[in-house]
Amino acid sequence: MNWISNYVRPKINSLFSRREVPENLWTKCPECGTMLFHRELADNLNVCTTCDHHMAISPRERFNALFDGGIFTEVKVPEPLADPLIFRDQKKYPDRMKAAQKSTGEKEAMLVAEGEMARAPVVIAAQDFAFMAGSMGMHVGNAIVAAAERAVKLKCPLVLFAAAGGARMQEGILSLMQMPRTTVAVQMLKEAGLPYVVVLTHPTTGGVTASYAMLGDVQISEPNALICFAGPRVIEQTIREKLPEGFQRAEYLLDHGMLDRVTHRKAMRDELVTILRMLMNLPPAIKGDLPAPAPAAPPVAEPAPPLPEAEAKAAS
């Protein structure tokens, strides 16, 4: 029995046991419920292939899709105080920061990078909603100021992708002070005559909407993005009335003049290239480079045809 128990039974169990499958191979679309394979979803820029729902995407994935060849350089952002108010709710603020850094792999909620789009220099800043809901703290303010200063130094446009739940409550009044700081940074760009283009993604709310997110020379949004200061549920409870269908969504705001464009994520790069080159007075972008034509070979002289016999005798 020992031979059966110790060898035969484990061998049979190993042949017929279920293999463990990683949990992150499939993603369920929150809109239509379709199960999407992770490679297919990544190739489609985190857009559902069934219902076209735009899911969250990290700043680095955006940069890879926007910059030429996915090549970019991060712009250094000054480090703020770690815990200026020594804030604690259910957890200490530094503990929440460590958890967000571990889950996202980023140091903070905004990333700034410089590179080229269609061979034209550009600075891009993007918020990461996965990092504490993309909340606007002192680091976000420092990032926008650093992005504006870098754009002025390079004399190139600044593109900002906004995605936030508002100001970061753990930093109190210091977080709210980033609203005027970022407004001054945007004004610095306008005084230098440089374009500032904002792309609003789902969701963009609170103090972010009340400051730098709505100050762009051109306001673009991804489809069906929620863009507001106070959310629709708060407004309904305040005025005690039913809100219109699609209220505070990108398409509703486009119809009411608060946005200039609603652009699909896969068409965002071409849209930005066209707009930025127009604002910078640059010629249209080259879609593809063709090899230079090979130099033409010199013509080879052909031998003259032989003269008829009578003409040859006359010539001699």
Image (cartoon, rainbow, N blue to C red):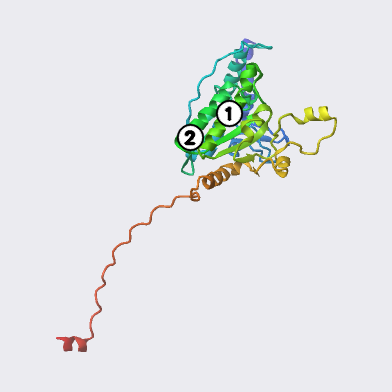
User: Can residue 26 be seen here?
Assistant: yes
Mark 2 closeness class: few <14, some 14–19, many ≥20 residues within 10 Å: many
Judging by the rendered image, the residue that carries numbered circle 2 is: 152
User: From the viewer's perspective, is residue 271 above or below residue 176?
Assistant: below
Residue at image point 77% right, 31% down? 232
Judging by the rendered image, the residue that carries numbered circle 1 is: 182
Residue at image point 48% right, 48% down? 282
In the rendered image, the residue lying farthest to the left is: 316
The secondary structure type at the circle numbered 2 is helix
Residue 277: image location, x then y, percent: 52, 46
Residue at image point 78% right, 27% down? 234
Residue 288: image location, x then y, percent: 47, 50
Mark 1 closeness class: few <14, some 14–19, many ≥20 residues within 10 Å: many
Tell which of 39 and 293 is nearer to you: 293
| Sequence order check, earlier mark of 2 and 1 | 2
In the image, what residue type sits under mark 2?
A: Val
Pointers 2 and 1 in contact (C-beta within 8 Å): no
* Quadrant in the rendering for residue 259: top right
Pick the quarter of the image with the N terminus.
Answer: top right
Q: How many marks?
A: 2
Residue 210: image location, x then y, percent: 66, 30
Pick the quarter of the image with the C terminus.
Answer: bottom left
User: Can residue 21 be seen here?
Assistant: no
In the image, what residue type sits under mark 1?
A: Thr
The secondary structure type at the circle numbered 1 is helix
Q: Is residue 302 left or right of residue 294?
A: left
Q: Is residue 246 left or right of residue 8?
A: right
- Alpha-carbon span between mark 2 and mark 1: 15 Å
Residue 29: image location, x then y, percent: 69, 34
Tell which of 68 and 110 is nearer to you: 110
